[in-house]
Image (spheres, helix red, strand yellow):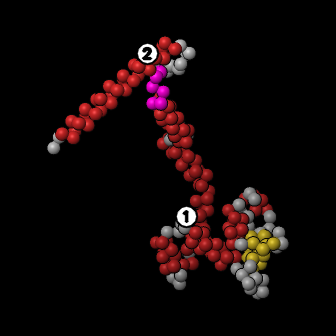
Amino acid sequence: MSEPQAATQAPITIKKYANRRLYNTATSSYVTLDHLSQMVKDGGDFVVYDAKTGEDITRSVLTQIIVEEEAKGGQNLLPISFLRQLIGFYGDSLGGLLPRYLEYSMSVFLRNEQQMRSYMQNALDGLFPFNPFEEVGKQNMAIFESAMKMFTPFYPPGQQPAGEPGREGAAGQSSVDDLQSRLDRLQKQIDDLSKKP
């Protein structure tokens, strides 16, 4: 649901029963905290009432969603120092100002979210002016082609067999001689290194 739709529609009513089950009155079905979390992420609006007392318990349910999201361990948005400071404001004389400050800060953050995403994308484009996966694919292909050339040493680089039997043998012998020469040089270097103290 988009934000303009959420603003014009009344919030969905969720009822919480004594057995801790949550009932979505709009869909006439039971939901979980994960469902409510996804509703928030999709821009949906809801209020939660205690089914027995009729008390608005939206704040405690949203807090419970945050606690569960933090417990999942995939992404922690609330630093420990922030949580400690937040706890410290309960009962403090300035604690009454904090909710308005946090709400204002979050609204400013949300207004600038798209601009920040654009800046981050531009920064990443500056670091990676090409698609990194495409580049990895090209590197893998180059390595594969190099490996294949090692298994076809009888043809000079860039040439494939043209069905000429005489050329194949001469080119093959030249490549074998070249490889043997390289192996001899490597062996000599290994021998020289092993002789050093």
Depicted 11 relative to depicted 153: above or below: below
Q: How many marks?
A: 2
Q: Report the residue marked by disc 1.
A: 75
Seen in the image, is 94 located left or right of residue 179? right
Decide if residue 60 is in sight here.
yes
Residue 1 % position (x, y): 75, 59
* Disc 2 residue type (three-letter): Ala
* Disc 1 residue type (three-letter): Gln
Q: Give residue 188's mark.
A: none
Q: Name the image quarter holding residue 179.
A: top left
Depicted 101 relative to depicted 152: above or below: below
Label 1 and label 2: CA atoms lie apart by 63 Å
Residue 147 % position (x, y): 47, 33
Q: Secondary structure at mark 2?
A: helix
Check if residue 153 falls in the magenta segment: yes
| Nearer to us in this view, 107 or 184 | 184
How packed is label 2: few (under 14 Cα within 10 Å), some, or many (20 or more)?
few
Magenta stretch in the rendered image: 150-155
- Which residue is found at the position 44% from the left and 20% from the top? 172
Q: Report the residue marked by disc 2.
A: 170
- Which residue is found at the position 51% from the left and 45% from the top? 123
